[in-house]
Image: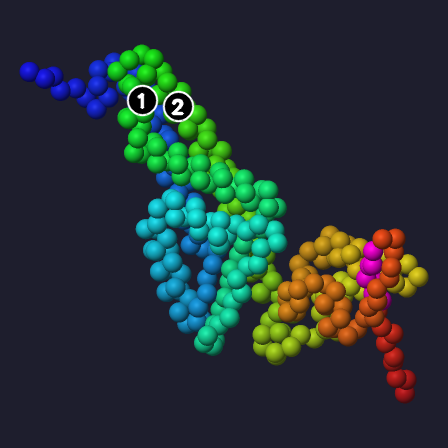
Amino acid sequence: MTKVTGIFGYLPGPQQNEIQRLYGQCLLHLQAYERLMKAIVAEHRLIGETDELEAIRGNQAAETGRKTLGILAGEMTSSFLLPEGSEPESFRPENLPSFGLHMRLILPREAFEQAEMDLREVVALRNRLVHHFLEEHELVTPDGRLKAQECLLKAQDRVEQAFEELRGWAVALNDSKKALAELLSSPDVLDLVTEGESSWENSEAVKALRQAAAELSVGGWTEVSAAVGWIGAHFPNARPAAYGCRTWRQVIHESGLFELKARSIQAGRRRFYRPRTRLVAEP
């Protein structure tokens, strides 16, 4: 008569408990990793008509919740993580009023390739643990049990490392959301939305550019790149995007309140600006 053994075969109690404990910890950590990835994938992009945004957000969360870890990893590196130099998709609404938000984390190409490799590695690790652990480890011998424990300890360390990296990306996403919320609630943006245009003369951007010029100008002219660095330190909430501009140089040009010119210095050309002279009529 064949003797039926437990799922791990002839395994003494303490050793069985330790392997089960390590295995359970690995799976719990992988679930936490997967849940965090689902949150990033579901929340980094929201596009649609304004009166349907809440429903779209709910549908995205539900749809993301049904995806496997492998699919999620693929979406991370095709939508949220992007290498430097790549062309992100642009938002072109078909109907109005519409809203489009797509947050991305741009990485140096080498870092992006490493992140892509790390994600694939975690997916493969998860699949081996869930589907092939008993096939790959001989648990009825002392040596087999020892190797299984070593494997689980390494797996646990790898998942914890991957989780910390993923958490860093999630923090970056949340920080971007907070910065966007502050930007959208700024007086300049509210004026742009309600009035259809921004008052350059009294804007935070022009104030920052003038103060930077007062601090940094040489011979009346201020290098644009130096001013940008100074503004970042002293006016952290002033951003070109609030005025529909991509760069500070565009702000300088669009405002019409500054002169802008290029100078050849050493091996390259640099941009300089200065406030235009304001004429005041006397009675």
Colour scheme: rainbow
x, y percentage for residue 236?
69, 56
* Up/down of 281 relative to 76, above or below: below
**Residue found at the very far right of the displayed protein:** 219
Residue matched to label 2: 151
Q: Which residues are magenta?
A: 268-274
Quadrant of the image containing the C terminus: bottom right
Instruction: Characterize the magenta stretch by its predominant secondary structure.
Output: strand
Secondary-structure class at tag 2: helix
Q: Which residue type does callout 1 highlight?
A: His
Instruction: Indicate which disc, 1 or 2, sits on the residue closer to the N terminus.
Output: 1
Q: Quadrant of residue 148?
A: top left
Q: Secondary structure at mark 1?
A: loop
Give the crowd class for mark 2: few <14, some 14-19, many >=20 residues within 10 Å: some
Is 72 displayed left or right of 243 in the figure?
Answer: left
Task: Please state which of the two labelled residues, at mark 1 or mark 2, is closer to the viewer.
Answer: 1
Q: Position of residue 282 (x, y in %)?
A: 90, 84
- The residue that appears at 55% across and 59% down in the rendered structure is 88
Tell me, yes or no, whether the highlighted magenta stretch contains residue 272. Answer: yes
Percent coordinates x, y for residue 238 in the rendering: 68, 61
Residue depicted at 88% across the width and 53% down the height: 266
Please tell me which residue lies in front, 195 or 223: 223
Res. 137 mark: 1
Q: Is residue 68 left or right of residue 180?
A: left
User: Could you tell me how far apart the alpha carbons at marks 1 and 2 are, in whole angstroms?
Assistant: 9 Å
Query: Do callouts 1 and 2 mark residues in contact (Cβ within 8 Å)?
Result: yes
Q: Nearer the viewer, residue 166 or 192?
A: 166
Q: Is residue 165 left or right of residue 129?
A: right
Instruction: Report if residue 13 is visible in the image.
Output: no
- Residue drawn at x 85%, y 73% as measured from the top left: 276
Residue 243 visible, this angle: yes
Checking the image for residue 256, the label placed there is none
